Structure formats: structure tokens, C-alpha cells
Amino acid sequence: MRESIEQLLDRLIHASAVERVAVSIAALLASILVGAVLVFVSGGFASCRTGLDIVGWTFCYNPMQVYYELFLGALGHPLEPGFHPLNFNLATTLQQTTLLVFTGLSVAVAFRAGLFNIGTQGQLVVGGLATAVTVLYAAAIVPGGFVGTIVLIPIGVLAGAIAGGLYGAIPGALKAYGGANEVITTIMLNFVAVGLTSTLLSWQFQDPNSANPQTAPVPEYAEIPNIPFIGFGGRMNFSMLALGFAIVLMIVIAWLLARTSFGYELRISGVQPLAAAYGGVDDKRMTVTSMTLSGALGGIGGAFWVLMVHGRWLENVPALGFDGIAVSILAGNNPLGVGAAAFLFGVLQSGSRSISTGTAVPPELVGILSGLIILFVAMPEFFRMIGMRYGIGQKKAVRADGGARVATDEESPNGGNRTSVDDGDQPAADDGNQTVAADGDQTAADNGGEGDD
Amino acid sequence: MTETRTGADETDPSGRPSTNSDLAVHLDGITKRFPGVIANDDVDLAVERGTVHALLGENGAGKTTLMNVLYGLYEPNEGRVVVDGTERSFESPRDAIETGIGMIHQHFMLVDTMTVAENIALGNEPRKWFGLAVDRDRIDQKIHDLCDRYGFDVDPQATVSDLSVGAQQRVEILKALYRGADILILDEPTAVLTPQEVEGLYDVLEELTAQGKTIIFITHKLGEATHAADEITVLRDGKSVGTVDPNQTSQDELAEYMVGREVLLEAEADAREAGETVLSAADLTVEDARDVEVVSGIDLEVHAGEIFGIAGVDGNGQAELIESITGLMTPDEGTISFGGKDVTEWSRRERIAAGMAYIPEDRHERGLVMSFDLVENGVLGSQRSPEFSRSGRINWDGVRDHTESVIDTYDVRPPDADADAESLSGGNQQKFIVGREFERDPDLVVATHPTRGVDIGSTEFIHDRLLDLRREGVAILLVSSKLDEVRSLSDRLAVIYEGQFMDVTDPDDLTEEELGLLMAGERPEERPVSESTTGTDSSMDATGSDAAFGPETGDTGGESE
């Protein structure tokens, strides 16, 4: 039992890029299959005038229609007459994609450095407020119009990056110099961020013309969608320019990790901290630096949320930072994969709205459907990460206690997962053999090293 | 349980190969292979009932693997496991536990926040009220009985985190006894204990064997093995060197068994010319994570064009000494200077940049990033050097060329720069690290066990390269547990024992017997003690230590040629 789970984890860890994409697609299809059954069955318990009658039961929902709305609705129904490529649905999809690229990159950079930054949300909240306030104050001294646009937007984004970066540096420094677990501190700092921004707002930055807790709106020429550019109009709260920037940033981060000394050191710190120390990496400084970079990316997300979506900062920031964790895991913490993962999330968000307007399916059920998709697609990557973090050698040590009963209980959830993963893995079985052989080597090496210490 | 038997055994000291039923454990021809490594090669082990049997060997000799075979963690590729005269085949530790085998790991498997009683009974709680509740009284009673019987002083209601390490170890032993163990395997039990606690452990072992229990004691420390064990089996490189009676052997003989004397071709070097001092350490004192002093006031000097060897049984402070020289640890006291500058406060990166190459002891954790390919590993440590990076960017084409030349020169197989480090065999990983470090154009090479796990041909090549570097005027600090290696390569040889240099001398002045004695912490009588040790007198000033350890130009160098 345990052997087969370990083997499965090994194969996941050593799966090639093509295999991983195949696994993801298979997982997506499997989730649709499960979701379709769920939608169909729930339809049997809803009441409606017209539905599918089977031996006296009436099934109200058509799963085909639901998934049609989810995926094609998110793009603005491209197969229907009267389709316009620059429609509102697609704008919403791409707007969410853009924002999630930033937060996904934020989480991914930290992950690659071996740090679990759950604080992207807080860094986004703080960065967003910094952007709004900076732009509002700078607007007073910068001329308006086109000049205002090209000055204020970069300043605003920069302010968001700096504020988010500093806010990310705090848990980094706490970990490096105080040994505080970054998972705990970043979670706590998320709450602090909400309280801090709310206090600052009521103290100084509240919009006097509004009863809602929000800042004054930034000038129209400082809103990104108002930049004259091909594509979506200003009312759609999205700009291709922003998406372009997100894609460029994605490439820059990927380049940084793969090609630079800093990225190289960051990656070693993430996979093998002892080797990093041997190679001359200062682990404390690396922890602070990578958390700062991660926070800065979250802060940029906040800046774009302010300058592109609302034109002002307001309380109750959506959970973009938390979704960033899922995006990053889905992307296997690969900066370039973040784009695809963010797009899937954008589709799910926008498609959900489309289902609500186009069908009678309740929003709760739609939530379950997107949840299923994320769960299914993310699980293989998630188990890859688990497998890598707890190498097989360590597993053996736990088992050495002979407390086999406890261990078996822990196994069962993994066992349950197997079915979902197997679907995707089967076609790639041949390639898998080779990789399994390679891991055997690693296990042996581990054992040898661990030996008699 | 079989108390009558112990008396019989004591009167029959030579009864080891007698009838099988006297043996609590008999491992017969155990071979355990991992891909690329033979961890145990046809190992025999016979343990008499009611005795303490030490399993002695260096790190990586295969001691733990052998015990994991006995404990059901590994299935042997060949050989038989016989427990109490019955051949067994364990699927898991649970089978081994049911057969009466208990293992006490070096790192305790206790739940810190639970009480002693809860920990001991965990997984085996007696029930009452038709299985609805844990019968705590019965647990307490049973623990009480066990404590009485074996003379343990443990409070069952104490929380584990409040106990000293020694007491926690007794809880581990109690846990095994509670589960009905007759044979106890202790994996490096003294590693975490203070000297007083070690004494306490010896008493416990004595009491246990007096009551008929059998103990297998894994250790790499000679003194412990001779002190505590009735018999000692020495393992080396996965093979059993032999079983000896500690009363009929000496510590230096055991030391030789442990480290072995591999037949090496004479790589002996031409006469050396004394160069400038490249590395020097003064009064270096290092404490480990447990605040135990593991390096105690060591002075050393390594000169350009010289190989300074450090011999000793593993675990006598070599690792900490080396790590503080290379910048991975901060010494608690003392200074290190390199190339005439005080580098005590320098970071590891600054030391690399200044020309310090380092072959680490642990290639899997330190020397290589296992999941990276060889190209990426080829730049480890040089990722900021001007040779391979410009304004923060790594020149990967240059790195690839360099890596391929290392692979080519050092015969790394498979010769594929895109192979992941973890896919290489241990010997090839080592060759790659050696190549990378030697080609760094260093002023100082710190080489720890440079040929461990490497085949004879490559060993010879690495030795030749070391001598080439020496000829080019590189200072070399060589730590090896292979006696012949340090003896034949070193210009001067220090013997380390419990964090101190026993002696620093020309290796040709020492016979193997003398070396063995020094490694076991005993000074040969004919050698004047005061002059040859690293006493405090020599650390008074730099010139003093130079006089004591500098190359003695008029010594017996000529004789050796």
C-alpha cells in the first residue's frame, strides 16, 4: 500500500513537462465528468417547469448547458451570432487573469525559495492603499492629461511594489533573524494589513464625499483602462496594456530565476538549503530578499486592482492573494505556468457569472463546480510538492518507529486520491518507468548518506 | 525472562559459534544492495543471548542498514535472519516488534506534549469498559513493574518535554520493554547524551543484560564499544571485518579495523619546498548545537605547496573544525587567517571568492544540488564569480563549457552535462565535486574524504591531481579516514582525538601502531608528549605555533624517498 503510494509520488515528482500537462488536462476532464453528474443529480431535487423527465423524476439542470456557459460564457459566447471579441465577459475574464498573474507570481517566487507566503493578500491590500494614496497626492503636483497618465501610473505601480515589498520583508526578517515560521506570521500580518489600512483610511485618506469606506477616486487620466489603446473601452475595467505588463513580468521573473545569479541562489535555497550555504548563499539575506520580492509582486497586484478595476482603494479587498496560492500551486510554482493557471481562474470567475445569468443553476452549485475543477487540477501538483518536501527517506524514518497503526491511518486520504491521479497517469506509464528507475538511485543515495549518523 | 541462561553464558566466554539456540540473533550472509551501492555485503552477525553486542564502524559502514534489515525496515537481497533459532522474514517493523525486537532510535520517537505513560502505551493501550476507555491504572501498574524490575527511576505521569535527554532515552527503552522486547537495538545511543548520562546508560544496559535481555549497540566510538560491550563486530564499507572480544583487543587495533588499510599505490611525493603560510588557525574552539565543545583550542598552519593531513576516527571534531575553516560554522573562540588576512568574520562567499576550494564530507546535502543537472551544479559556489557571471547574469554557455571539461577531465560517467546530479552513482558524484573544486584555481583546497566511495582508478587520479596542485603551490588541508591516504599524501599529519590534535608530525615518523594508538586517544610512550601536542604553550603567539608545526626542513624527508 505505502510502497505504491511512494512509487506514485515518485512518478509524479519525476514526470516530464508533457506528462504534467497531460495530467492536468485529464484532471480537468475528470472534474467536468464528476461535476456534470453532480449538476444533473441536483437538478432532480430542484423544481422547475420544464426539465428532463425520467421515470417520473424531473431533472431541471442540463450539465452540458452549465459547462457551455462556464467556459464559452467566460469568453463572451464566441459561437453565437452577434459575438463581439471585445465583450464585457471576456474583459472580466482577462481582468481577473491579470490580477491573478501578479499574486500567483508573488506566491510562486516565495515557494521557489522554500517559503510559503500566505501573506500575498496582506501585501496586496497594503500595496493597493499605497498606490491610491501616492497617486492622489502626486496628482496635485503633476499636470493632467497624457503627461499625468505616463507619470502617475508608473509612480502608482512603483509605490504599490515598494509598500508590498516592505510589508513582505517583515515576515522575511522575522523568519531570518527570529526564527518565526513564515506561514504563521504572514497569516497574522494579513489581519494586521486589514486593520492597518482601515485605520489609516479613517485617520487621513477617507473620501469626504462618500459614506463608504474608500479613498477618493484617482484622476481619470490615471486609470489604466482609460489609456487610449486598442481593445476594451474604459467602462470594462480592463486594459490589454495591463495584461501585456503582467505577461512581461512573468517572463522577467522566469528569466530572473533561470538566468541570474540571484535566481540561481534562490532556487538552491528552495530545494537544498545546506547546498546553498555551501555555495556561499547567505540564507538570512536570501529569506528577506525573496520575501521582499514576493511582497513587491503582491503589491503590484494591489496597484493594478486600484488603478484598473476601481480607480480607488476600498475596504473589503477581494481574496486575490489567497487565489494566488491556488494559482501558484496549479502552475507548479513555475512563473510561466502562472499565466495559464491564472487564465483558468479568470475563466471560472467570469464563467460563474455567466451561468448565473444564463441558467437556473444556483450560485452555490456553480461554486462547487469551480471548486471541483481547481481541486482536481491542483491535486497532482499538490502531491508533487508534498512528495518533494517529504522525501521518501524521511518517510522511512517515521515508519521506523513501528507505530504502524498511525501511519496507516494517514495513508488512507492519499489512497483515495489515487483514483483521480491514475486517470491522467495511465497513458504516460511507459515514460514513467524510466523515471522510477532514476529515483531508485536517489533513494539509495539518501540511505547511504543518512546511514549511521 | 530466561534468567537461568545468563549464568551459563558468562561461564563460557568462547561459546560464540556453539549451538544456534544460544544465539538471540543470527544474521547469516546478509547482502543489501541499493542501486549503485552495496550497503551490506555478505555480513554475518551472531549475538548471544544476554549480552551487549557492539556494532562498530564509521559513518556509512552499513551499521544502520544492517539493523534496519533486522528490524524489518529493509528486506535483504540475500541472507537469512534468524531470531531465537527460528528463521524469520519480516515485512515491517511490526513483525519485528511481535518477535520481540525493539529499536531505540538516535532521534527519539516520543510525543513531547504527552506523559511518559501515554507515550509508552501509545498504540498498545489496554482497554476497559468493553474497549471504550483506556485502562490507565493498568498502564501505570505495568510501567511501575518494569521500573522496579530494571531499576529505572521514571515518573509515569511526567510530561516528556520536561525530561532530560537521558530520561527520555530511558522512556524509549521502557517503551520497547513494554511491547515485550527481548532484543533491544540502540542506534548511537550516546550521541545525544552528556558524559554523566552515558554512565547512567551503561548501568541500564548492565541491568538489562543481567535480566536476560540482549542488546545490540550501534556506535562509531571506540571507547564506548570496548567499555560497554561483551563482544564487538566491526563493519567497514558494508563488510564485516570480524568479531572480537574487547578484553582481548586494544583500541588501536579496533581503530585500524574500522578505518582499514586499503592497498594504495605509492603516490608519495617529491621533496617539498616550504612555502608561505596560506591558512592558519589559532586556538580554535567550536561548540556544536548542544553546546558541547567539539573542537578544543586547535592551532594549525597550512603552507603553500604542502598537504596537511588530519587523521582520526570520524566524529572527533573534524567536521566542525573544517566547517569553521570553510565558513559554514562560526567558531566560538579563536581566529582563522587565510592568505595573510583575518577571515574569522568572513562569510562563506567571501572565502570562496578569496580562493578557498572545499570538497565537503556530505556530497548529497552540501556538495551537489541533487535535483539540478550537472551544468547547474558546475557553477555552485562560483555563481557570483566574474568568470561565470557579469552584472548578475550567469553566462550559462561558459558554465556548460566548464562543466563539460570537468566531466571530461575527471572521467565523470555518464559524460552528460544535462544529467541530474541524483542520477549519478556516488563515486561519479564525488569525481564531479572534486573536479569542480580543483578547477576553481584555488589557493587552498580543503578536501574531506576526497576519495570516499570512489573506485581505485579514480582514487589514483584524484591523488595525482592533489599532488599536482601541491606542486603548483596550492595549500591542501586533507581530512580522511583512510589511513594510507593521509599517510602517503601528507607532508605533515595531525591526529585528532576528541577535538584536540594528539600530535602533529611527519607521517613517516609514525608507525601504524603509533597512529592507531593516537587515534584511540593514547600517546605512544616513546614520544615526548609535551613537544608534540597542541598544548597551550604553542598558542601563545604566532611564531610559537609556527615553530611547533611548521615544516621542519631538516627532518627525515630524504629517508622516505
Image (spheres, rainbow, N blue to C red):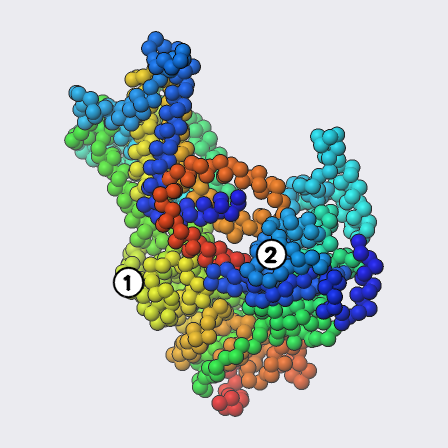
> Callout 1, which amino acid?
Gly
Whether pointer 1 and pointer 2 mark residues with C-beta atoms closer than 8 Å, the reply is: no
According to the picture, the residue beneath numbered tag 2 turns out to be B68
In the image as oriented, which residue stretches furthest toward the front? A55
At x 29% / y 24%, what residue is drawn?
Answer: A68
In the rendered structure, find residue B398 and report the number of the disc placed on it: 1
Between the residue at mark 1 and the residue at mark 2, the CA separation in whole angstroms equals 45 Å
Q: Within 10 angstroms of label 1, few (less than 14), some, or many (20 or more) residues?
A: some
* Image position of B209 with respect to B459: above or below: above
Q: Amino acid at mark 2?
A: Asn
**Residue A409 point in image, percent of width and height:** 57, 38
State the image quarter where residue B60 is shown.
Answer: bottom right
Q: Quadrant of residue A340?
A: top left
- Tell which subunit mark 2 falls on: B
Question: Do discs 1 and 2 share a chain?
Answer: yes
Q: Secondary structure at mark 2?
A: helix
B131 is higher (above) or lower (below) than B50: above
Q: Residue furthest bottom?
A: B559
Q: Residues within 10 Å of mark 2 (few under 14, many from 20)?
A: some
